[in-house]
Image (tube, rainbow, N blue to C red):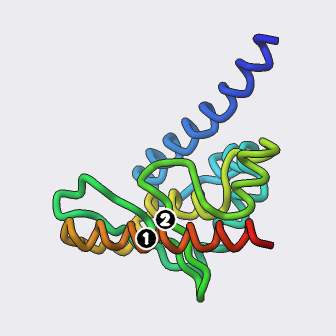
Amino acid sequence: MEKSVFSKSFIPQKAFQELERAEIIFGEQNLFPNETLEILHSYFGESLTQATQLLEKARVTCYSTPDSFRKVYEISKSQDRHIIIGNVNFCQCDFFSSQVLDLQRSLSCEHVLAVTLARIMGKVREEKLSNNLFEEYLNMQLNVFLDIDTQDMLC
């Protein structure tokens, strides 16, 4: 039984270490070698493929306070928007809820991975907000999330 618990915590840890290693490699070579992509795909599977496709069409914006202490990333494509907090592996999308949290079939979703890849590749638009505006932005996102969650519960 301990082996199972170990492997459940070890594999995600190793996968995210590989993402960190990919960031170093990209910084040195300004590209992801095929071997690096294959390793990442072995951990993240189709979510990685979807993340790269999403990056071709989506915009990633980092909203931060003037001191850059607090950051959130918004990935948006048309009307579809997702908020990712800093380097936290969490997304409010249905895939993350079902496949990552509930069924534990995936380590992350396309939105978290797309934000991570955009950050690594320097494809993030930076927006500094005053502390008050940042707080308003977060409250607005929370209200949108709560409205969606409430609507789901009513259905």
Query: Farthest residue in the front direction?
Result: 154
Q: Which residue, given by chain and number where applicable, does mark 2 sit on?
A: 118
107 or 35, nearer to the observer: 107
Question: How many numbered marks have been drawn onto this rendered protein structure?
Answer: 2
What residue do we see at 71% from left, 66% from top? 50
Horizontal and vertical percent position of residue 102: 77, 45
The secondary structure type at the circle numbered 1 is loop
Residue type indicated by callout 1: Lys
Image quarter where the N terminus lies is top right
Compared to residue 107, the image places residue 50 above or below, namely: below
Are discs 2 and 1 less than 8 Å apart at CB?
yes
Image quarter where the C terminus lies is bottom right
Q: Residues within 10 Å of mark 1 (few under 14, many from 20)?
A: some
Horizontal and vertical percent position of residue 109: 67, 57
The secondary structure type at the circle numbered 2 is helix
Q: Is residue 8 left or right of residue 17?
A: right
What residue do we see at 59% from left, 88% from top? 78
Residue type indicated by callout 2: Ala
Compared to residue 68, the image places residue 35 above or below, namely: above
Compared to residue 66, the image places residue 15 above or below, namely: above
50 or 6, nearer to the observer: 6
Q: Is residue 19 left or right of residue 140?
A: right
Query: Gap between marks 2 and 1, in whole Å?
Result: 5 Å
What residue do we see at 69% from left, 58% from top? 48
Horizontal and vertical percent position of residue 67: 17, 57
Query: Farthest residue in the bottom direction?
Result: 78
Q: Is residue 135 left or right of residue 52?
A: left
Numbered label attached to residue 98: none
Numbered label attached to residue 123: 1
What residue do we see at 72% from left, 43% from top? 43
Horizontal and vertical percent position of residue 69: 24, 52
Q: Residues within 10 Å of mark 2 (few under 14, many from 20)?
A: many
